[in-house]
Image (cartoon, rainbow, N blue to C red):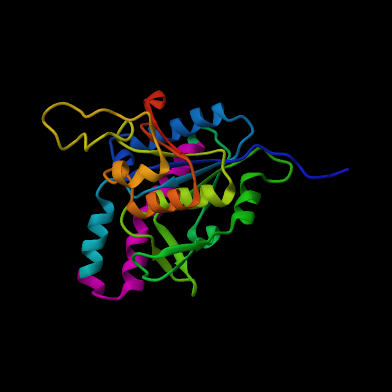
Amino acid sequence: MSSAICRPKPLVLKFGGALLGQQGGVERAAACVQRERAGQPGAGVVVVVSALGATTDRLFDEAARRFGDDEAAVADHVSSGEEEAAQRMVAALEGLGAPVLACSPECLQLVTTGSLLDGEPESVNADGLQMELYPAGGEPSVVVTMGFVALDGAGRRSLLGRGGSDLTALFVAHHLDACDCVLLKDVDGIHESDPKATEQGAPARLDEVALQDLERFGGRVLQSKAARFAARTGRPFSLGSPERPGLRTRVR
């Protein structure tokens, strides 16, 4: 008889920087995590966070002045934005009584190749993450990790390119075989065209988008590298707003 323990597949939730940067955004995101957990009883949850608001722009500007073309120094400096966001999310979830753990890039071990500022993800410590999500003898955990930030083969911090938190979430979800990956942003889904670039009313929101059409429709709200990864691996996900879960676009 097999002694393997059957657990629900984990859930991956990613929160965008525009969302977290709003007044009370981190606290509302933490409440959303609790609601999503209630909808997936027994599942561990990975929470991927972006830097708040325009923090990444500010840090890149600072890094350019201080470090010039030193990619390692730039990546390390810019990663502090996600680090702050992760700390604030952990604190907010602790305040709600969630069984929360922080997972740094060194813990996650998402390893990239290529440029330190626009790396390609190659591997992630999925086994270690599963152990964090489902501790022996305890209830499933909420593991908060930094989006956009990874490590190169030498252990230096690297970045996944602008908008790379989307790619972090999808890459982790793929390697965990997650039950779902939800990209939570300040929009209620994917639209036929940019809802913020028209004066003639919001374009139609799409209930569903095929993975092969994702770059065409999702490029305005989703990192292109992330869209290509999802299409290449067949990784389904949802995209939308925390406040309007019934209106999220399903991509598959």
Is residue 242 visible to us here? Answer: no
Is residue 32 visible to us here? Answer: yes
Q: Which quadrant of the rendered structure holds the N terminus? A: top right
> Residue 19: x percent and y percent?
32, 38
Residue at horizontal 49 percent and vertical 45 percent from the top: 235
Q: Is residue 134 left or right of residue 212?
A: right
Farthest left residue? 199
Q: Is residue 20 left or right of residue 173?
A: left
> Residue 193: x percent and y percent?
22, 37
> Residue 58: x percent and y percent?
23, 57
Q: Is residue 142 left or right of residue 62?
A: right
Residue at horizontal 40 percent and vertical 35 percent from the top: 29
Name the residue nearer the viewer: 23 or 49: 49
Residue at horizontal 49 percent and vertical 51 percent from the top: 233
Q: Give the overall secondary structure of the magenta segment.
A: helix
Placement of 244 over or under 10, stated as above or below: above
The span picked out in magenta is: 65-94
Q: Is residue 229 left or right of residue 10?
A: left
